[in-house]
Image (tube, helix red, strand yellow):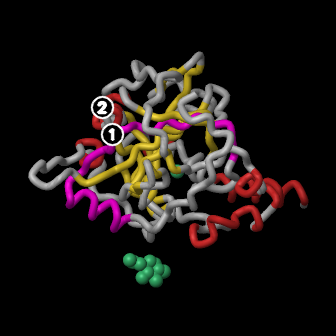
């Protein structure tokens, strides 16, 4: 009885979890065809109205209150990072299939991959680590601030080690291209219509080229980096964050669609403490 309760709660806490997702498999009988399926969703036991107090929900969320390097933060450091430079050779310019859905807050995507085998996924290296992109999701407005300024949205590209431990997140702030420079983001455009936060279905087998997102922020040549955490419960620490200096620019219409598909989804800004920004 106890084990079945524990098992059930493990499923509930990881299904649709953000940023870690476990819906990386397509329905085997459907192959790789693109198909829309209602998968329903498990209710979350947390929300953004009380993001300053997540630790009171259950003991497993204690780091949300007592952690030493929680995310997101305001990056007030003008200098850019010189260390931990990422190498994106393993981010090939190809479209790979995955599941496109809504996290209950904003659009999200997980790549298909064989169980316990991440080698087909886009990957990058920094220091001596190789990390694999399991998926991405959006927050609106942005979670990170740069010198006190918040962007309209932020894309989190979540990477794990070969052992499936969360290890690195790229936090790409999204902004509207200035008037007179009509820019459509090719990364956003390839997704087609975005999935609304009330929609419990997902598109399986959608092909997405994530190299486009990296290129649209200048290849991350200029970035900040720091030691941080998941920005949702259980707020686990020990992740390296990369925040490109350049925003990913979208057209006005694209931004309106991103905001319309999303709910308010930024965690309260955390105090900078043992984050070692750029160190
Ligand atoms: C979303 O769903 C809720 C609950 O069913 C409903 O009250 C609300 O009007 C819906 N919002 C939109 C924008 O469809
Ligand atoms: Zn996130």
Looking at the image, which residue is at 29% across and 42% down? 187
Q: Secondary structure at mark 1?
A: loop
Residue 221 in the image, given as x and y percentages of width and height: 36, 26
Q: Decide which of 7, 109 is in the foreground and name it.
A: 109
Q: Decide which of 27, 91 is in the foreground and name it.
A: 91
Q: Farthest residue in the left direction?
A: 180
Looking at the image, which residue is at 37% across and 52% down? 35
Instruction: Specify the quadrant of the image occupied by residue 245.
Output: top left
Image vertical order of residue 77 relative to residue 91, above or below: below
Residue 50 in the image, given as x and y percentages of width and height: 63, 70
Ligand 1's image quarter is bottom left
Q: Secondary structure at mark 2?
A: helix
- Badge 1 density bin: few <14, some 14–19, many ≥20, Cα 10 Å: some
Residue 254 in the figure: left or right of residue 150 = left
Magenta region includes residue 87: no
Instruction: Specify the quadrant of the image occupied by residue 262.
Output: bottom left
Q: Where's the N terminus, which quadrant? A: bottom right
Residue 267 in the image, given as x and y percentages of width and height: 56, 60
* Callouts 1 and 2 close, C-beta under 8 Å: yes
| Residue pointed to by mark 1 | 246
Magenta region includes residue 243: yes
Looking at the image, which residue is at 42% across and 60% down? 140
């Amino acid at each position: 009885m106890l084990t079945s309760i524990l098992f059930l709660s493990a499923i509930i806490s990881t299904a649709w979890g953000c940023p870690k997702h476990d819906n990386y498999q397509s329905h085997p009988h459907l192959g790789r065809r693109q198909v829309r399926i209602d998968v329903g969703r498990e209710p979350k036991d947390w929300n953004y109205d009380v993001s300053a107090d997540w630790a009171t929900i259950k003991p497993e969320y204690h780091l949300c209150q007592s952690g030493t390097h929680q995310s997101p933060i305001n990056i007030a450091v003008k200098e850019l990072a010189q260390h931990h430079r990422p190498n994106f050779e393993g981010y090939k310019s190809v479209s790979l299939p995955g599941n496109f859905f809504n996290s209950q807050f904003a659009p999200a995507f997980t790549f298909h991959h064989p169980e316990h085998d991440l080698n087909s996924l886009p990957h990058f290296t920094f220091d001596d680590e190789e990390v694999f992109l399991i998926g991405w999701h959006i927050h609106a407005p942005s979670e990170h601030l740069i010198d006190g300024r918040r962007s309209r949205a932020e894309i989190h590209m979540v990477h794990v080690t070969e052992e499936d431990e969360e290890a690195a997140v790229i936090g790409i702030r999204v902004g509207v291209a200035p008037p007179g420079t009509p820019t459509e983001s090719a990364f956003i455009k390839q997704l087609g219509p975005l999935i609304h936060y009330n929609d419990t279905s997902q598109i399986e087998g959608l092909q997405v080229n994530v190299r486009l997102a990296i290129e649209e922020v200048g290849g991350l040549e200029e970035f900040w980096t720091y030691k941080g955490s998941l920005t949702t419960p259980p707020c686990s620490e020990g992740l390296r964050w990369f925040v490109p200096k350049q925003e990913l620019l979208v057209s006005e219409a694209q931004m309106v669609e991103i905001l319309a598909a999303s709910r308010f989804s930024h965690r309260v800004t955390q105090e900078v403490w043992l984050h070692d920004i750029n160190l």
